Image (cartoon, rainbow, N blue to C red):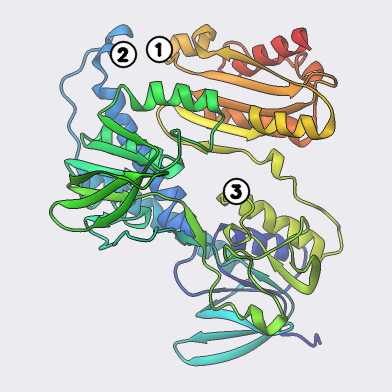
Amino acid sequence: MSEFDYDLIIIGAGVGGHGAALHAVKCGLKTAIIEAKDMGGTCVNRGCIPSKALLAASGRVRELADSDHLKSLGIAIGGVNFDRPTIADHANNLVSKIRGDLTNSLKRLKVDTIHGWGKIAGPQKVSVIGDSGEKIYTAKDIMLCPGSVPFVPPGIEIDHKTVFTSDEAVRLETLPKWIAIIGSGYIGLEFSDIYTALGCEVTMIEALDSLMPGFDPEISKIAERVLIKPRDIETYVGVLAKSIKPGTPVAIELVDAKSKEAIEILEVDACLVATGRIPATKNLGLEFVGVELDKRGFIAVNDKMQVIQDGEPIPHLWAVGDATGKMMLAHAASGQGVIAIENICNRPKTIDYRSIPAAAFTHPEISYVGLTEPQAEVLAQQEGYKVAAVKTYFKGNSKALAEGETEGIAKVVYRQDTGELLGVHIIGIHASDLIQEAANAIAERKSVHELAFRIHTHPTLSEVLDEAYKRAEVAA
C-alpha cells in the first residue's frame, strides 16, 4: 500500500491539467484532479472553443456578404441574414459538448474528479474545501494548473453588460451598434473580426505605439491593411483608456499614453476590455512550501516544469499553464503538462518554447512560430551570427488563386551561416494550419538547406512555405 492517497494530485482541470491527467494515467500514476468551477477551464468555457465557434459563424456571414468575391467565382446569392441567438447557441452548445467529452474521458480512465477549491496544505498535502467542508489529501507529487483571468487595468469599471471582458463577450448576448475594444492583441483582433462581420462599428484603442505589437512588424503592417482598414474599424494608437464608466452610453476617457494629456471623452454603446490576462494564483497555499510568486503573480518554474524558489526546485511540486507566464496558450499548457509527467516518471525532458506555434483566427488568419525578425536580430548580436529573411506571397500560390483568397504572405527568418530556421510568420487563408509544418521544423532545428528539398503537394497552400524555403536556400 502506498503511503499517499494518490501518486499525483492536479489542481485545476483546464486544458493543461486535463492533458497532464491523461498522460499520467497512461504512465500508471493513480491520479486525482481538483476543480472549483467548470471542467475545461478558460479554453473550453470562456476562451478558445466558444470564440472559434463565433469566428466560424461570423466568418460565414462575412464570406457570403462579399458579393464581389462570390461574383468572381461565378456565384450570385441574395442578401445574407443571421440570427444572433442561434450563433450564440452554436458556441454555447459546442462548449457543453467538449466539456462533457473532457469529463467523460477522465471517468473512462478512472481519474478521480474532486469538486472544490484546492490548495497546498504542506509538502505533499492538498486541502480541498467543498460543499461538505474541508478534506486533506496526500500525494507523492502535486501539480498546479490554476490558469488565468482577464486583466482589467486601473480606472476601468466592469459591469459585465455594457463594459465587459472576453468572459462575457463569448456569450454574444448583444450586438452593440458601436463597440470600443481596448487592446489590439489576439483577443481584440478576433472580436473585431466577429463584431464587424455581424454589422457592428468598432473603435480599437491601443496604448502602445503600434497596432498588434506582439506580431512580427511586417505581419502587423499587412494585418492592419487587410483586417482593419477595409472594415468599419476606427483606431487609436499610443492612446490610453484612463477611465471607463459603464452605462448608456459607456464613457471612455482617452489620454495620450506617454504624456497623459487629455484627448477626448469617447461615448459608445459598449466596451470590450481585451488587455490580456493575469495568473489566477491567489490562495494556492504556496506559503506552506516556502514558495513566493514573482512580482507579476506568476509561479516560477524551470523547463522541466518544476516549481522553483531562488532557482532551486521544490521537491514534488510542479506547475503548468498560464500561471507560469511562459506562453499563455492552451496547447502550450497541454504540452507543459506532458513534459511534467515525463519528469515525474524519471524520464527527463525539457520544453522547447521556440517551437510552440500561435495563431489568431481572424479572416484571414495570422500564425507564427519561433522568433520575430527583431528578436532574431537581438539573439544574433549576442551569439555572433547574421540573420536573413525571405517572403513569399499568397497571390503567387495556385490554390489561393483558385480560392480567390490571395491576401497574405509567409515570412521565413533564418541564420545566414547555417540556414537554421529561427521563425516563420504567416498571414493568409488557413495560416493556423500551415504553421505546424514550420513548428515541427523548428523543433528539430532544421535548416532551410534541408527544407528546400522537401516535396509538397501541388496545388496546396503549403507551397507558400515550400517557395519560401527555396528562396532562403538560394539566398543563404
Labels in figure, total: 3
Label 3 CA crowd tier, 10 Å (few <14, some 14–19, many 20+): some
Q: Which amino acid does label 1 sit on?
A: Gly
Work out whether residue 426 or residue 32 is closer to the camera in this orientation and state it: 426
Q: Which amino acid does label 2 sit on?
A: His
Q: Residue at x 37, y 38 (%)?
A: 55
**Is residue 364 found left or right of 254 in the rendered image?**
right
**Nearer the N terminus, badge 3 or badge 2?**
2
Callout 3 touching callout 2 (CB < 8 Å): no
Q: x and y percent of residue 174 in the render?
A: 20, 49
**Nearer the N terminus, badge 1 or badge 3?**
3
Residue 69 marker: 2
Callout 2 touching callout 1 (CB < 8 Å): yes
Q: What kind of element bears circle 3?
A: helix
Q: x and y percent of residue 381 in the render?
A: 78, 30
- Separation of residues labelled 2 and 1 (CA atoms): 7 Å
Which quadrant does the C terminus fall into? top right
Vertical relation: 397 (above or below) 56: above
Q: x and y percent of residue 53 in the render?
A: 38, 43
Q: What kind of element bears circle 2?
A: helix
Q: Is residue 125 visible?
A: no
Residue 404 marker: 1
- Separation of residues labelled 1 and 3 (CA atoms): 31 Å
Check disc 3 and report the residue beneath it: 331
**Nearer the N terminus, badge 2 or badge 1?**
2
- Separation of residues labelled 3 and 2 (CA atoms): 34 Å
Work out whether residue 368 or residue 275 is closer to the camera in this orientation and state it: 275
Q: Residue at x 60, y 86 (%)?
A: 127
Label 1 CA crowd tier, 10 Å (few <14, some 14–19, many 20+): some
Q: Which residue is drawn at 46% across and 61% down?
A: 149
The quarter holding residue 79 reads top left
